[in-house]
Amino acid sequence: VVGLAATLFRRRTPYIRVPTTTLSYVDASVGAKSGVNFGGSKNRLGGYVPPCAALLDSCFFETQECRDVSNGMAEMAKMAMMKSEELFELLEQHGPRLSADKFAPNATND
């Protein structure tokens, strides 16, 4: 809602995205769209104005339920299927561990 309000108020008021779910973390890292549900439809109203910053801290994942992490992984897989075979292959190879460990590194080279 804040992103849409910032988009509409004085056309492009600067705002910062702070994701509160793993799914929104994924969206905030790549997206410029801000939308709100209206009239029973998802993202019916919105705009395409990127935030001036997005606060993304990987420690955030430790606070999430496993289901929320899985939802974020599904969003990554959806993007990978449309845009990047390389990312899809990485998710296929490392996805189960990343999801189970909530993206925590398991070695010094992670």
Image (cartoon, rainbow, N blue to C red):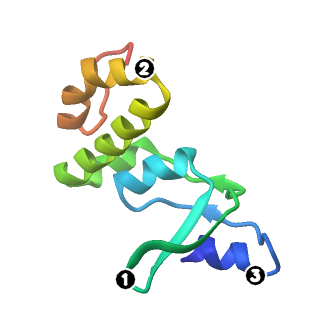
Does residue 10 appear anywhere in the picture? Answer: yes
Does residue 106 appear anywhere in the picture? Answer: no
- Is disc 3 surrounded by few (<14), some (14 to 19) or many (20+) residues within 10 Å? few
Q: Which mark is residue 40?
A: 1
Pinpoint residue 96: horizontal percent, then vertical percent.
19, 29
Instruction: Compute the Cα span from label 1 to label 3.
Output: 24 Å
From the image, tell me which residue sits under label 3: 9
66 on left or right of 104: left
3 on left or right of 36: right
- Asked if marks 1 and 2 touch (Cβ < 8 Å), the reply is no
Q: Secondary structure at mark 3?
A: loop
Tag 3: amino acid: Phe
Would you place residue 75 above or below residue 38 in this image? above
* Picture quadrant of residue 77: top left
Pinpoint residue 87: horizontal percent, then vertical percent.
42, 23
Q: Residue at x 52, y 61 (%)?
A: 18
Q: Mark 3 or mark 2: which is in front?
A: 2
27 on left or right of 92: right
Instruction: Compute the Cα span from label 1 to label 2.
Output: 34 Å
Instruction: Compute the Cα span from label 3 to label 2.
Output: 39 Å
Q: Secondary structure at mark 2?
A: helix
- Is disc 2 surrounded by few (<14), some (14 to 19) or many (20+) residues within 10 Å? few
From the image, tell me which residue sits under label 2: 85
Tag 1: amino acid: Gly
**Residue positioned most to the top:** 109
Q: Which mark is residue 74?
A: none
Which callout, 1 or 3, points at the residue further toward the start of the chain?
Answer: 3
